[in-house]
Image: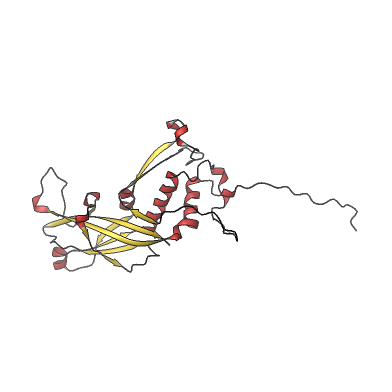
Amino acid sequence: MKSNLMLKKFSTNTVPGTMNQKELRTFFGGKVMYLEDIISITDDTINFSCVINDYNNGYQYFDVTTIPDDWETYFSENLTDLKSNNQTISLMSQNSDIMLNNTKWQIVINGSSILRDYLYFRLKEQRVFKMINANELYSNDITNAIYDYINKNIFSRYRLEKVTFYVKYYNMQQQNIYSNIKLQYNPKFNVDVYDSNNLINANIIGFDPYKFDSIILQYNQTKSSSQYSFDYYFDLTFSKI
């Protein structure tokens, strides 16, 4: 029998609940963040503000209306820019006759990046992570923690509902030096095309509403490329599962 009955002492350290971004379900339920039933990535602009500095970068105070304007930096994120930065257009393989008359194009859209950034902008706009410091997060980075929260709790709750595609043609023979010059085989992603009159159908290759890392659209010009150029635009619509 031990002569020393002293029990080993343990210390208890508190750990902020924000260290784990995964929302855990319990028998009695769990926290549920309100989410939009339908998300339309159109030409809207999302505004938010946060602290920009080397330490606690991305921090948001409790109420932006009660702090001096210079305490947080304001951002205005346009969804047209978000889509433009996450899409590319290229020529498909085709013979010279098709190339000249009904040119085949392929547009690749990174739908996952668009949805994640949209959700990030909305969480910042609603100040969901306000008053949370970087040292209270596992990554020591507020921005990374928000994206981690999105990936673990929100992203998988949406499916791609539809892609809406717009095209507007320009007669290259009717241009002048005072307008934006349109070049042959050089279509541009352009918000000016965003009009119901320019709505058309495009072929979506292998459409899968649950896998939208790469959304591939194929489009054949309906007007001869020898005379017409075009600009295009698209919307993405996601629905909650």
Q: Position of residue 132 (x, y in %)?
A: 53, 43
Front in this rendered view, residue 42 or 55: 42
Q: In this rendering, does residue 134 appear at all? A: yes
Q: Is residue 188 above or below residue 126?
A: below
Residue positioned 9% across, 50% down in the render:
174
- In the rendered picture of this protein, how many numbered marks are placed on residues? 0
**Residue 99 image position (x, y, % from top left):** 16, 64
**In which quadrant will I find the C terminus?**
bottom left
Q: Is residue 142 left or right of residue 13?
A: left
Quadrant in the rendering for residue 114: bottom left
In the displayed orientation, state which residue is furthest to the front: 28
Give the camera-side residue of 39 and 52.
39
Residue 213 appearing in the image: no
Q: Position of residue 60 (x, y in %)?
A: 48, 40
**How far from the left and from the top, in percent, is residue 102?**
16, 65
Tell me which corner region of the image, top left, top right, bottom left or bottom right, holds residue 230. bottom left
Asked whether, in this view, residue 117 is left or right of residue 100, the answer is right
**In the rendered view, does 72 fall on the left or right side of 189?**
right
Q: Residue at x 29, y 57 (%)?
A: 88
Residue placed most toward the observer, 88 or 223: 223
Residue sitting at x 41%, y 48%: 122
Residue located farthest toward the top when viewing the structure as drawn: 68
Quarter occupied by the N terminus: bottom right
Instruction: Say how the picture is coloured.
Output: secondary structure
